[in-house]
Structures are given as C-alpha cells and as structure tokens.
Image: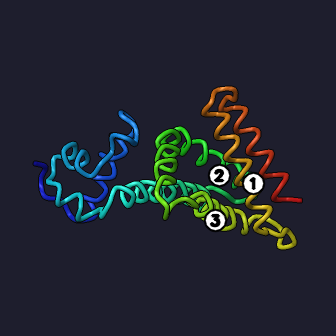
Amino acid sequence: MTSRLTKEARHEQLLDVAAKIIREKGTEALTLITLAHQAGVTKPITYKHFASRQSLLHALYKRCDKRFVDAMNIKIQQQATNFEQAVTLFTDAYLDCLEQNGREYNEVIFALMAYPEYRDIHREIRHFFCQALISVFKPFISPSIALDKVRLAAIYGALEAVADMLAEGPSTPHQARLTIERLLKNELTA
C-alpha cells in the first residue's frame, strides 16, 4: 500500500497511474480494478475518486486540456508582448502537448466516444479549444477582427489535422510549426 495522501494528491496519483497504464497497454487495459492494483490502493479508493471507468477517462481528458491551457497561458502571460510572440508561444505549447500526450489523449477520446453520454465529446473539445484561442489571442489582435465560432472552429480543425499528420509521420515538427504559425497569423489578422 502507498502512504496516505491528501484527496487531491491521491486523485493526481491515480490519474498518473491511469495515464501510465494507457501508455503501456492501451485504454482496453484501464479499469478501476487494474488502476487500484497498479496504484497499490484498494478498489474502494479508486471508486471513491471515479464512479466509473468513463468518469476516469473523462478526468484524464480534462486534465490534459487543463495542463495545455495552463502551460500556454503561463508562457504567454510571462513572455508575450505582441501577437507574433503569442503565436510562437501558443505553437510551442501546442506542440509540447502533442509530444507529451498525443497518443494517450487520442486513445482516451476514442474510448470515451464508446459511451453514449460522450458521443459528442469532439464538440466539447472544440468549444474548450475555441475558448482558449479567444483568451490567448484577443489581447493581441485588432478589435475589428471577429473571433466568430466558425473561424475558431476552422482553426481548431486545421490544428487537429496538423496534429494527425504529425502523429502519422508524413509531417515533421518543423513543418507542423511553420504550418500552425502561418495558419494563426493568416486567420487571426484577416
């Protein structure tokens, strides 16, 4: 058994172990029972933190998105003084997130889609991402630029396609960087 942790620390520890299980064995291997075993805790502890497998998967997805936005916001707030810098820092954070979580994140999303209540998870992700784009770039662009839902959704879709191409191998990180930066500059200044 592991030592007694605070509720928040235990929750993070369980999510870390769940991510490791997915990384090593895929989402099929992730259950609350395997999580308890791998984390060295009792089954009731995992059920106390996650009522079901889908709530565990949802927590993993939300944590990944939150970490991306938090890392991006910190970089931009501390380092960006203009639009160009904001674009570069956003791109850095996006590519870092893909490198650290890409495969596991996609597996979690696909697993969530098997549950009826999460069939539209892509809509939730797109909405979250579009809100992140607004919060990051609004201070750096002209008020006359409309950050409407369609434009933001198009940016989101294009970034997802770049991420897929990077994961599949025909694209390099350098190509992905140039494409993302060009896309953001063109769409957020026109």
Disc 3 marks which residue?
127
The 10 Å Cα crowd at callout 2, few under 14, some 14 to 19, many 20 or more, is many
Side of 30 where 186 appears, left or right: right
Side of 53 where 65 appears, left or right: right
Separation of marks 1 and 2 at Cα, in angstroms? 13 Å
Amino acid type, label 2: Phe
Instruction: Using the image, tell me which numbered label, if any, was put on residue 139.
Output: none
| Of 1 and 180, the residue lying toward us | 1
Q: Which residue: 70% across, 60% down?
A: 81
Q: Which residue: 64% across, 50% down?
A: 89
Amino acid type, label 3: His
Residue 26 position, x and y percent, is 40, 37
First-in-chain label (2 vs 3): 2
Separation of marks 2 and 3 at Cα, in angstroms? 17 Å
Amino acid type, label 1: Ile
Q: Secondary structure at mark 2?
A: helix
Q: Secondary structure at mark 3?
A: helix
Disc 1 marks which residue?
155
Of circles 2 and 3, the one toward us is 3
Side of 13 where 103 appears, left or right: right
Residue 135 position, x and y percent, is 65, 67
